[in-house]
Amino acid sequence: MKKKIAGIAGGFLLALCGAVSAEPVKIGMVTTLSTKAGYLGEDIRDGFKLAIEQGAGKLGGVPVELMVDDDGRKPGKGKQIADRYMKRDKVKIMTGIVFSNVAMAVVPKVVRSDVVYISPNAGPSALAGKGCHENYFNVAWQNDNLSEAAAKHVAENGFKNVYMLAPNYPAGKDAISGFKRFYKGKIAGEVYTKLGQSDYAGELAVLRAAKPDAVLFFLPGGMGINFIKQYAQAGLNTQIPLFGPAFSFDERLLKAVGDAAVGVVNGSQWTHDLDNDANKAFVASFKKAYGRTPTLYASQGFDAANLIGSALKAVNGDLSDLAAFRNAVRKAEFDSVRGAFKFGHNQHPVQDLYVREVVKTADGKTTNRTLNKVSENHVDAYASQCKM
Amino acid sequence: MPFDASRFRTRTGVLLITGLLFLLLLPPVSSVMNESYLVSFFSRILIYALAAVSLDLIIGYGGMVSLGHAAFFGIGAYGVGFLTFHFQESTLFIFGFEGTDNALISWPFAIVFSAALAAIIGALSLRTSGIYFIMITLAFSQMFYYLFVSLEAYGGDDGLSLWSRNRLGPLDISNDTVFYYVCLVSLLVFLFISWRLVHSRFGRVVRGTRENELRMQTLGYATYRYKLVCFTIAGAGAGLAGALLANQNEFVSPGLMHWTHSGEILVMVLLGGMGTLFGPVLGAMAFLLMEEVLAAWTEHWMVFLGPFLIIVVLFAKKGLYGLLTGERHE
Amino acid sequence: MLLFIEQILNGLQLGIMLFLMSAGLTLIFGIMRIINLAHGSFYMIGAYVAATVASYTGSFLLGLLAALPAAALSGMLVELIVFRKLYNRDHLDQVLATFGLILFFNELTRIIWGRQPLFMDVPSWLSHTVELIPGIPYPSYRLAIIFVGIMVALLLYLLFTRTRLGMQIRAGAANREMIAALGVNIKLLNTLVFGLGTLLAGLAGIMAGPILAVEAGMGESILILTFVVIVIGGIGSIKGAMIAAILVGLVDTLGGFLLPSLLRLFLPAATADGAGMSLASMSVYILMAVILIWKPRGLFPVQG
């Protein structure tokens, strides 16, 4: 009986994944579609799919088959899916992971097994520095980059007594060290909050008492919504300006924050109003396809797809020589929606970083508007530790 | 049920032998079918089955509903994680001990580590009962979750990546098939121990305590001690499962200890049929297969899994094991 | 010192928020002996409906008026379909079935409303700050939460001590057979109590909407704390829930505030902050474990 159940299930799986013959190049996407952070993975996937749809099922003229699976933000689950892609589907290209902890579980093993992994989001420092690998490419950023952009803006605008706040987990610690790398002035306070915390009244009271002249914070997703709303309700938004990386200010999240975020300046590598042809076309077609403004995550998914497309084109869809494919990826000959793009020697982006301001449009919506470029050809801080 | 007990026994026997044969033959069959992924997927199932069986010991036989069992699972995984990490970094662990990648050291260490913590947590938690017991075990597992999230030296929330699986004597467990059989043997050994245990005098006392603690006490049994020993053994079993999972994933993270993970293991036990020992193996298999199949079918798979669980509770009181064997659990 | 007083106020406010959630849960458990892990789902339903209606109409009050019955009715519906069959089952079946409900409701909200969080604003007449303590402006919306919480506590007190329905409920909790024998429709009573419990959960969700992210899974973030509260208070005791909620609120708020500075007395600053933060994350669970080891049936055990 057991056998029967497993047999049916196994057959079902087989039918789902194995039906197509070997012609199109398979791309395995492990991403987060459930949990509170599900919209991040959704945008990465939708951005990626848009690129495939624009090529009518092809990337760089090569037919591709995209497989998407939800990791539920669980490292073990992500690992299991990656394992299936490698063993069952013989996938040679993987992408999609949203969170650093999932990436840390999946990527090291995958790249050692002769699979090229293109990260559309997570950029943990370990993979940019000591743990860099020839099969690992990051097309988004190293985790600290956007925090560094915000901190650089704060430092350049004459703030002298800055308060820093982040959740108590590795990405939070990375963000704070990113802040400190570019803001060297006096620190009014450095606070780590509980991961997943919802009420920040206690932290806000301490923050107010410390009397800083600016606040740099990193609280991604729902934590950011809670914090920004409560910051405004406490009347602090009119007194002490907030700064942070774009993770608390993506276009979908802004809808949930409303006016409380207006005026906040945040650091990003991309915004929907960046003035280049590739971006204009991308934003217009994304809006048309999905009826919403793309987030930075969507732009990263789109870039990841086009990067893969450029490399597939160079090798004519032939992945038997992985080194050739890898070299083609390294050249990054695609039109990134963020404008100029190239890889550094650790295969992380060398790119321009911007700050943008949250503004209210004429029809009452909140959105980001690019202010200025804060950093040109920005290289991440861990590149020097990478021996490649 | 004197009239046709033999028929039940035959059906159960057939089920168990078919199941065992299926598990034994899975690797060669899947390699013939060119489906090597099934081997590592089923290793995972076996590991979760081990954890579920250990939870069944305390729930199904001891009547102690724990919503913190994943803590011991996670502790076991970190037991291996710590030693392997220090081995990789060539640094000292605690008390001047070095790390190691030798499974013959790190796995027993993981088991003892989990069992010791289970003994401590059990000793404190067993002062309570019923829903208070559920909640205090949950509290302890959440404490460990937050503790490990803040252990920066061991990667905190990001967890620890192991470079490779442990060394296990002459066996090369980095080979998926070998590792599969190691998991299978571990599960069978633990099932055997548990089976002997619940059918011994010890097991009868524990079950008697579940039915009527006061009566057992008046009969002169120190029920608290029996329950504690049972809880500790279950902790050890979960620790072994954790050690295996750390090797399977080559990765450990605090998420293993989160209460929702405890909830999942609990679901496996109930799905399979609690108080049956073999049922949880079926439960683990059904749960993980369903997750995999449903997730491949629709991204909104949870909207189907949820009602399915409710239906199982409402209509299949004895779980899958009861359904297949026609046996009621004890 | 002023800061300390402000933190106590914050702790109180968090406590009241937790009480709103716990009151319904402890009520349902006290009367029907049922563990409802899905309580947080009704909190989420309250918040989602309120946020949706409020954003269409621009009125917080209309959102409130729509969301309260939505939470209560969905609660009663689930009671009719699922819970009614669970009353005589053991806690384990209830845990599993309600775990299933959580999965279902979370995914359903994702299907209906999409994956991104929803927006819900503070009503404009509560968007100001008040200087309760000189020099420290306090958001008036948070004061409103405290007010609503106290009103709910009062109403529940009156319901249970002064009304016929309340007495029937209490009698039902003490002896189900007796009350049924007296001709009270126990099934209807159960459905009503369940509706009342989920109404309170919905109210908590509505009140939380403007300050927290309205997102699928928001119920679980607060669910565990709610369980901590009702267990510390003694399950089934409204009074216990009130006191435990405030205790938990204070420990959670003051823990994060005081522990790092306390540890700085003995340890280097960086270590102290790290250790303080981890202790603060665990403080609520430590509190619960200690109380249960000391009093295995909570602070105010309910007979029966």
Image (cartoon, coloured by chain):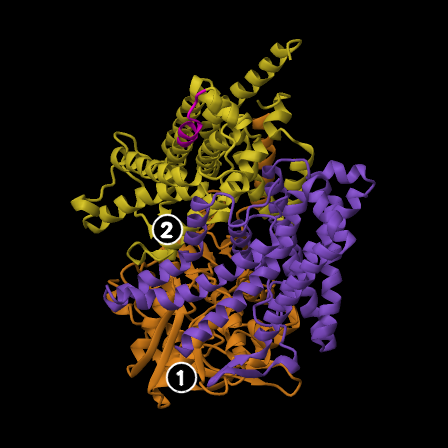
Q: Looking at the image, is mark 1 or mark 2 nearer the viewer?
A: 1
**Which residue position is annotated with label 2?**
A114
Chain B rendered in what hue?
yellow
Percent x, y of residue B240: 37, 35
Q: Is mark 2 on a helix, strand or loop?
A: loop
Count of numbered circles in the view: 2
Q: Residue at x 22, y 51 (%)?
A: B89
Residue placed furthest toward the left: B96
Quadrant of the drawing holding the N terminus of chain B:
top right
Percent x, y of residue A29: 50, 56
Residue placed furthest toward the right: C183
Q: Residues within 10 Å of mark 1 (few under 14, many from 20)?
A: many
Residue A387 or C204: which is nearer the viewer?
C204
Q: Is mark 1 on a helix, strand or loop?
A: strand
Q: Mark 1 lies on which chain?
A: A
Q: What stretch is highlighted in magenta?
A: B220-228
The alpha-carbon separation of the residues under discs 1 and 2 comes to 47 Å
Numbered mark located on residue B27 in the image: none
The answer to whether residue A365 is seen in the rendering is: yes
Q: The orange chain is which one?
A: A
**Which residue position is annotated with label 1?**
A214
Q: Is residue B49 magenta?
A: no
Q: Which chain is purple?
A: C
